Image: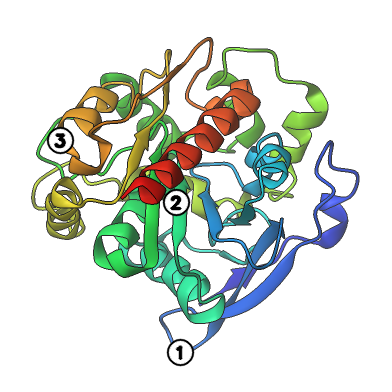
Amino acid sequence: MKTLRTPDERFADLPDFPYSPQYAEVPDGEGGTLRMAWIEDGPADADPVLMLHGEPTWSFLYRRMIPILVAAGHRVICPDLVGFGRSDKPADVEDHTYARHVEWVRALVFDKLDLNRVTLVCQDWGGLIGLRLAAEHPDRFSNIVAANTGLPSGDISMPEVWLQFREIIRTVPTIDVGQFVRSGCLRPVSDAVIAAYNAPFPDDSYSAGPRAMPGLVPTTPEDPAAAANRAAWATLCESPTPMLVAFSDSDPITGGMAPIFQREMRGAGGYEHPVVDNAGHFLQEDAGETLAGHIVEFLGKVQERHSES
C-alpha cells in the first residue's frame, strides 16, 4: 500500500491547539503498517472520552471542547483517522474501505491504547466508525454521545444535499478541505483556522481519504457495509448504554437522524437531549464549548444514576 505522511512543519503554529501528537503503528490490512496519530489530555487514570472526527476534518476540530472536558476531570483522546490529520495517508482511493477504517480505529483504541469504560463522542464519519465499534465491542463502552452523525445501511435514501456533495467530491479536480469545512459552519471561521484544516493536505495527492469517504457511505441495501451497519443498529437499539443525542439545529445532512436516535435507542431514554443552536454540520467548530458543556452535564447525570442504583 502506497502511503504519504504529511511533513511535521505543516502543523506548526496551529491556533489554540497546543497538543503534542502521539503515534502508534496499526496493520494496514495488506501486510504492512500505518502510523496513526492521536492527542490526549487530562488525568491518565480517568475514564477515557474518545472523540472521533469525520470527513474531512481531524482532531483539531475538538480543540475548543478538550479544555472543558479536562477541567471536569475527564481524560480526552482524539485520534486522527487514517488518511486525515497527522495519520498516514493511503494514496489510492481504492485503499480506503469502510471495513478497513473500522478496523484501523479498533486496532488503535483497543489493541494499542487498551481503552475501557469509554465514552464515545462521534460526529459525521466518527459515528459511522465509532457506533460500529460500540455495537461490536459493547464491553468497552460506558456512554455514547451522538452528534450530527448516523449509521446508514442503504435502506433509507440519503438527503439530496449529501448526494450533491458526493458528486462534487468525485469530480472536483482539487479538494479544498478548508472551504468544505467553512461551508458546513454557520458562524464565521477565520483564515487561520481554515489553514489548519488544510494543513494535513499539502497537495491533492494527499487527499485520497477525503475523496474516498463519501463513496463509502452505504446508499443501497446491497452495499458491502450495509449488513454490518444494520446489525450494529439493531444491537444499539437494544443496548442499555446511556446515549446523549446532541445535534445542531442546522445540519441538512444528518439533522433528520436526531429524533430517530432519541426514539429508537434504548440508552437514550430518560435523558434530555439538547439542540445546539446556531450551528451547522461541524457543530464542534460552530459551538464546541456549548457541546462540551452538554457532554459534561450528561456524564454527571449518568454518574448520579449509578450512585443511586
Please indicate whether residue 214 sits to the left or right of residue 4 in the image. left
* Residue at (61, 61) in percent of width and height: 46
Relative to 3, does residue 239 appear above or below in the rendering? above
Residue, disc 1: 31
Q: Nearer the viewer, residue 177 or 269?
A: 269
Under mark 3, the amino acid is: Glu
* SS at mark 1 in the image: loop
Is mark 2 in CB contact (under 8 Å) with mark 3? Answer: no
Relative to 118, does residue 270 appear above or below in the rendering? above
Is mark 2 in CB contact (under 8 Å) with mark 1? Answer: no
The mark closer to the camera, 2 or 1, is 2
Under mark 1, the amino acid is: Gly
* Residue at (42, 84) in percent of width and height: 30
Q: Position of residue 281 (x, y in %)?
A: 47, 25
Label 2 packing within 10 angstroms: few (<14), some (14-19), many (20+):
many
Which residue of the protein is positioned furthest toward the front in this rendering? 308
**CA–CA distance in space, label 1 to label 3:** 40 Å
Please indicate whether residue 2 sits to the left or right of residue 189 in the image. left
Residue, disc 3: 264
Q: Is residue 176 visible?
A: no
Which residue of the protein is positioned furthest toward the top in this rendering? 278
Relative to 91, does residue 2 appear above or below in the rendering? below
Per the rendering, the mark at residue 120 is 2
Q: In the rendered picture of this protein, how many numbered marks are placed on residues?
A: 3
Please indicate whether residue 284 sits to the left or right of residue 216 in the image. right
The mark closer to the camera, 1 or 3, is 3
Q: Earlier in the sequence, mark 2 or mark 1?
A: 1
**CA–CA distance in space, label 2 to label 3:** 18 Å
Q: Nearer the viewer, residue 79 or 1?
A: 79
Q: Nearer the viewer, residue 174 or 23?
A: 23
